[in-house]
Each structure stands twice: as structure tokens, then as C-alpha cells.
Image (cartoon, rainbow, N blue to C red):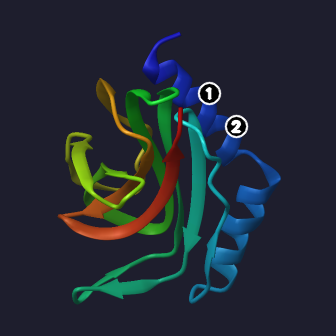
Amino acid sequence: MSVVSTLISHLRRHMASPAVILTAAAAVAAPTALLALPAVASADATGCTSFGNHTVWGHTFPSGVMCGSVIGSGTYVDGIGGTAAFAGPICNYRFVGTFYTNYNQYVRTVATPQQNRCNWNTGLQTAGLYAYVPSGRVVITLQSAGIPVASITEYIQP
């Protein structure tokens, strides 16, 4: 199974889960709330978070839901991916995966290509890595024009 098809499978399962639907409803109903679903500790995991309207570095972003995945086995990582949906448009977006060791040392960063357009949802975005990484974590961040909008953390263990 390819990285993209695996990511699609993970994200579809999580984006359609009752917990994500309830979280999305809460984000839209209470735009100042920030809710998160727990991440699963594995190199092959998906996590989601929702967020209300918020301002970062002087830029206001609409409420929405973001899911991110890391695909692999043990400490071998095939890639990262993400998808998000919003109550309003978001522009010039991409997903960035930043890897750290268990000792919080920076390892490396991978990113999806920046989408230079505005949308109410990002569709599935993926970036390949195809490498071993030390045990630790990856922080998958949705950026808009380089500004962090939302992020999730997944843990990578052998």
C-alpha cells in the first residue's frame, strides 16, 4: 500500500469518526474553544485537533479541524500528511513535520508543497521522508503563509 493511500485511509477514518465530528461541531459552536484528541504513540498514527477563531502574529484564522498522520513502522517513517477544514477560507497553506528525539533535540523537518490559493479545506497534503528517525516525536503543523495555525504531536517508538 502506498504512503498516500495509507494516509487517505487513516485520515478518512479519523475525519469521519464521531469524536472528530463532535469536536468539529464544538469548534464551530464555540469558536473560542480549543479541543484536542489524544495522539496514538506509534510511527503509524493519526491525530486530530479542532480550534476556534484565533489570531496569530496579527493574522486571524477561522475555526476548524486539522488532522495529521505519520506513516511508517517502528522508527522508519515513510512520510507525513495532513488535511483540514475551516469555517472560512485559509490561504497559502502547507503542512510541516518537525521531528525531535526523546531528549527534545531537533532531528529534521519535512514539508508538503505550499498551496498558493485560498480554500475552505486543504484536501489531503503529503510529504515523503523514507528514512529512519530516532525514537521521539513529530509535530505536524498546518501553516498559512508560514504562520502556524494548528498542530498535533505524534510519538515515534520502535
Q: Circle 2 sits in a helix, a strand or a loop, which is it? A: helix
Residue 9's tag is 1
- Say which residue appears at 29% left-offset and 61% top-offset: 143
Number of marks in the image? 2
Residue 13's tag is 2
- Say which residue appears at 26% left-offset and 40% top-offset: 112
Residue 65 in which image quadrant: bottom right
- Say which residue appears at 30% left-offset and 24% top-offset: 131
Task: Tell me which amino acid carries mark 1.
Answer: Ser
Furthest-right residue in this view: 18
**Distance of mark 1 from mark 2, alpha carbons?**
6 Å
Q: Circle 1 sits in a helix, a strand or a loop, which is it? A: helix
Point out residue 101 in the picture as x, y percentages from the top left corner.
36, 51
Point out residue 41 in the picture as x, y percentages from the top left corner.
61, 46
Residue 110 in which image quadrant: top left
Q: Nearer the viewer, residue 106 or 129?
A: 106
Task: Tell me which amino acid carries mark 2.
Answer: Arg
